[in-house]
Image: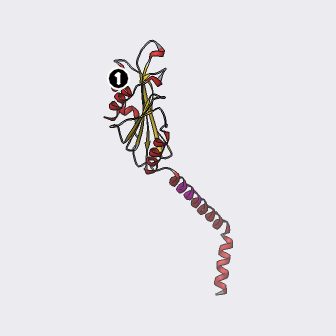
């Protein structure tokens, strides 16, 4: 038995560098696996596809509101951040008088998972001012018109829509009727 133990010791001593190298490689692989798992677990899981404002508010719909020629002021595909995604799309008419340009703008904030939907609902409620607000029925799950900003906020399902339609230089002059017209183009 002693000879067998001695043979094993000799074998290990002769191959010590190889065992250390193998142990280092296994250790590095375990660490890399743990880091990958940690990154994967910390990335929010997208369960729901975020709304794309420009797919809902197309140039054709903008022309229906603003006239035959519109200028695309900027579009973006949904950008995911945490449990939420945001998307924006806006157009203006071609009025040569800059201060009289009519702007139609849509911003959508989507919950991409259940946590995002809960956050969207809570933030929608928290963002509602206590004064200068008119509740709006028959639009989404909840809606209000913020008179001081001239914008219509609508919560529908996983999405929070923020709509504005009127003279770009004075958005506070936007009317509820105009914003509802824009909402009907987007939501229907």
- Image location of residue 55, percent across then percent down: 37, 33
Residue 188 vs residue 30, the one in the foreground:
188
- Image location of residue 15, percent across then percent down: 65, 69
- Residue marked by disc 1: 65
Q: Is residue 55 magenta?
A: no
Q: Secondary structure at mark 1?
A: helix
Q: Quadrant of residue 155?
A: top left
> In the rendered view of the protein, which quadrant contains the N terminus?
bottom right
Q: Is residue 58 visible?
A: no
Range of residues picked out in magenta: 31-38
- Image location of residue 157, percent across then percent down: 37, 44
Q: Quadrant of residue 150?
A: top left
- Image location of residue 28, percent across then percent down: 60, 59
Up-down: is 25 above or below 69? below
**Left or right of 116 in this view: 10:** right
Q: Is residue 27 visible?
A: yes
Up-down: is 28 above or below 166? below
Q: For the point 51% across and 53% down, which residue is it?
A: 40
Q: For the point 35% across and 37% down, which residue is it?
A: 137
Q: Is residue 36 magenta?
A: yes
């Amino acid at each position: 038995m002693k000879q067998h133990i001695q043979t094993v010791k000799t074998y290990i001593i002769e191959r010590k560098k190889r065992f250390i190298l193998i142990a280092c490689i296994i250790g590095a692989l375990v660490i890399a696996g743990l880091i990958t798992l940690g990154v994967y677990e910390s990335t929010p899981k997208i369960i729901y596809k975020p709304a794309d404002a420009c797919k809902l508010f197309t140039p054709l719909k903008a022309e229906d509101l603003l006239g035959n020629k519109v200028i695309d002021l900027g579009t973006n595909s949904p950008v995911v951040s945490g449990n939420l995604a945001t998307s924006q799309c806006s157009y203006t008419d071609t009025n040569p008088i800059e201060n009289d340009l009519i702007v139609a703008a849509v911003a959508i904030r989507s919950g991409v998972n259940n946590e995002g939907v809960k956050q969207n609902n809570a933030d929608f409620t928290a963002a509602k001012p206590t004064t200068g607000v008119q509740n709006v029925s028959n639009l989404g799950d909840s809606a209000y018109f913020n008179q001081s900003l001239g914008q219509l906020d609508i919560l529908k399902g996983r999405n929070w829509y923020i709509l504005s339609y009127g003279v770009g230089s004075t958005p506070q002059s936007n009317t509820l009727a105009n914003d509802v017209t824009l909402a009907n183009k987007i939501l229907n």
